[in-house]
Amino acid sequence: MTNSSQDESGVAVARSVVDLRARIADWRAAGARIALVPTMGALHAGHISLVEEAKQRADRIVMSIFVNQMQFAPNEDLSSYPRRFEEDAEKFAAAGGDLIFAPDVGEIYPEGFATTVTVAGPASVGLEDKFRPTHFAGVATVVAKLLNQCRPDVAIFGEKDYQQLKVIMRMARDLDFETEIVGAPTLREPDGLAMSSRNLYLSPDERERAPLLHEALKRCAAALRGGVKITSVQAAALEELEAAGFSVDYIEARHAETLAPVTRLGDGLVRLLAAARLGTTRLIDNIAV
Ligand code: PAF
């Protein structure tokens, strides 16, 4: 038996690690495979596609919902980040999920908390890390905790945050986590915009222009495949996006595994990654070449 309560949606909710572990122990005793889908809430169809992926790989699906303060810089959107627990619980229940782990800040970062996971490799390649220097240490620390708390067989992360996915895969290998880390494809709006909880910040005018980021990436990929030099492709995309009112942080062709810079397509599997601000909203996206 466990102390986890039930939300109005009917889905079980654990607020403490003790409750989470008790529930998982019951499932394990019955021989179930467990999947974890870590999120910060404000669920959209992209998150639900991660749940669907999890259901292919496990019998019981746990979703964590925790807005992790440690991965936000002081100038970022921690206080305005959308929090909509009831809606999230309904969506997760409708998707066939089993348990939400929704700890409060004190459960994750108790008084005296003093440990940070330091990450390098794909976490220090001059992409997101250049613009958000403390971000991946915050992500790695909370994900390491969630993996230890839940000890799932598999954990699913979206390819939308491609660098994050590679950082987590590297960390899991380096620190011998037994959990298999799986990346799931980005879900897009009909006009191509990658789904993100932060799309809620876009004004109607910005929302109309936002799909240009994905279009620019697609044009870059086609040009690269057609033999155009990476530097020319990058310069054209930058010009195009800036002309449409984006402020571009980066648009880069990288090795799909290491995220090291590539100079030619023949250097291995290539991934195009971009980040740009539209008004106050920062959008990121990536595609395979
Ligand atoms: O991708 C996210 O939503 C977050 O970075 C994660 C992995 C849940 C860690 O807080």
Image (cartoon, rainbow, N blue to C red):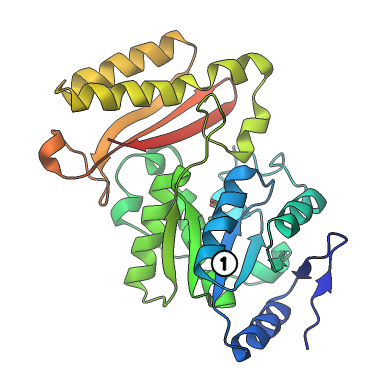
Name the one closer to the observer, 281 or 56: 56
Residue in the picture at 25% in, 39% down: 254
Residue 102, quarter of picture: bottom right
Q: Is residue 147 left or right of residue 125?
A: right
* Label 1 crowd bin: few (<14), some (14–19), many (20+), radius 10 Å: many
Residue in the picture at 66% in, 53% down: 67
Q: Would you say residue 7 is visible in this rendering?
A: yes
Q: Would you say residue 142 is visible in this rendering?
A: no
Q: Establish if 158 lies above or below 80.
A: below
Residue in the picture at 70% in, 69% down: 99
- Residue 74 coordinates in the image, percent (x, y): 60, 42
- Residue 210 coordinates in the image, percent (x, y): 53, 21
Quickly name the residue at label 1: 36
Q: Establish if 23 lies above or below 217.
A: below
Inspect the image, locate mark 1, and give the three-letter code of the amino acid beneath it: Leu
Q: Image quadrant for the N terminus?
A: bottom right
Q: Secondary structure at mark 1?
A: strand
